[in-house]
Amino acid sequence: MSRSNYTHKSSNIQQKLFFIVFCMLVFINPFPLGSNRVWAWSFEAMVATGLLLVMVLCSLFSNQCISWHRLKKMRLELKLIALWLFINLLYLIPLPIPLLSFLSPNVASAYADLNQPYGFLSLDVYASLKTLMLSLYYFTLFILGVILVNSRWRIKFILSLLLVLGLFESIYGMYLVSIGQTGTLVQVTTVSVHNASGTFINKNHLVAFLSMTFIMGLSLRMIIARKIKDTTHLDFKIRVIRFISHPLRMLDVSLFIILAGIWNTHSRAGLASFILAMAFLIAFVFFSNKSKSVNYKKILSVFALGIVLLIFVADDVNFLLNSLGQNTDDSLGHVMNSAQGRVLAVNQVLEHYPSYWFSGVGPGAYQVFFVNHRMVEQTAFFDHAHNDYIEFLIEYGILSLSLLILLLVFLYKIFMFIFKTRSNFYKYLGICVISSMIYMLLHGNMDFNARIPANLVIIILVISVIYGRIVMSSIIKSDN
């Protein structure tokens, strides 16, 4: 074996090992309460950072180990991410009280009362440091995803991994509901028997995870189904046998179970966001599909029948109707009480935002803001605003626009890629990535899934999976 062949083979083995570690990181992410604890995501962040450092060191000794050429074509995105990280860093820099008073008078007054010569833009420096560390972790995962998920086989493997995670969370969540329990794999506590939460803290976090895994699992199905041969010329009995025995049926069953898990969360905002995201996905596929090789009417009909069947056989339909306030005054009151806290949180932010409009109260410092400006009507304590938009607005002020611009750049680039590519593989993948992002944007109106590491990791992962191909779109060939 020549030296060049040996080096190339060694590089392939190294890349495979890097990809395996990356997949293991993705796999463990949802189990420890959706990684919504510092010890959980900090461990994952150390693994991700260590993996990236090893990759960098490997590339220093061999130019065939890792290719970084994709990052060179993402200058705008990397600049915006760097700006976001710099903004988070600003909240950790001690500033003289006069300068702090100029930038954020209300925050400065809190430090001035302590008779200190300096202060921070954040009311909770520890929470802001935690947010910065989380942002660095997310950035590391994005880079790893763009670099390591560099083939169709790896893309399909990642989609399959997400499907497996969604399947497990659905089965585990419904099992706990059946015995009137909830909790992690190591801690189970008694709660309402009606709301599946899986290994997450509550139903709203689980429904977001399941919805995105369902959408990405559906993308895997569309990718595989696009190459199914036409069997209309065969005998009906043969067609039925082939349909039942096809490996896609296992995938269909998995998606159906995830759908059942979504239903069993009974999350009103989550279910509504999921339905709207799916409606967008179906409409997008319908209007952008140029190939007649895939019969989407049959695919969608199967899922529609599955939903109807699930509704009719579920024994908890009455509970959902009650919780939606359709049957009794008590249930209507339950819905109103649930929504009242969120409305009060929105009003609280809108009332006091002019005092913090420039730099906010600091990343992660919403609960300090809540306590400082708590209303008489707010009988419950909120550590999150149950609305991602107003929470980012009050924590970052006008600086939150940088995150919005970054999100719009991602959306725009993926949209344009979908319309330009001639590859059905990447078109279907892109549509489902957009649909997952739309789900998070919709659910963000009534919850805070952007603060749940496991759910944000999924969004970052699926964006990175498609984004590696966007920067290489000039070499993509048609595979119709």
Image (cartoon, rainbow, N blue to C red):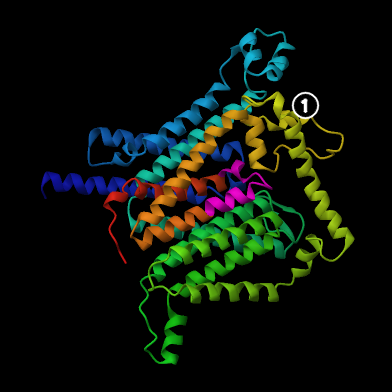
Q: Where is residue 398 drawn, in percent x and y?
A: 60, 29
Name the residue carrying label 1: 372
Rendering quarter of residue 194: bottom right
Amino acid type for the residue under numbered disc 1:
Asn
Q: Residue at x 50, y 31 (%)?
A: 84
Relative placement, left or right, of 454 versus 239 is right
Q: Where is residue 380 drawn, in percent x and y?
A: 81, 40
As for residue 184 lying within the magenta part, the answer is: no
Q: Where is residue 441 drawn, in percent x and y?
A: 59, 48
Q: Where is residue 480 drawn, in percent x and y?
A: 32, 67
Q: How many marks?
A: 1
Secondary structure beneath disc 1?
helix
As for residue 449 lying within the magenta part, the answer is: yes
Q: Which residues are magenta?
A: 436-453
Rendering quarter of residue 65: top left
Single out the residue that lies furthest toward the left: 2
Considering the whole magenta stretch, tell me its main secondary structure.
helix
- Tell me if residue 31 can be seen: no
Q: Residue at x 51, y 37 (%)?
A: 405
Q: Where 387 sits versus 208, above or below? A: above
Relative placement, left or right, of 4 versus 163 is left
Single out the residue that lies furthest toward the right: 329
Q: Where 448 sits versus 82, above or below? A: below
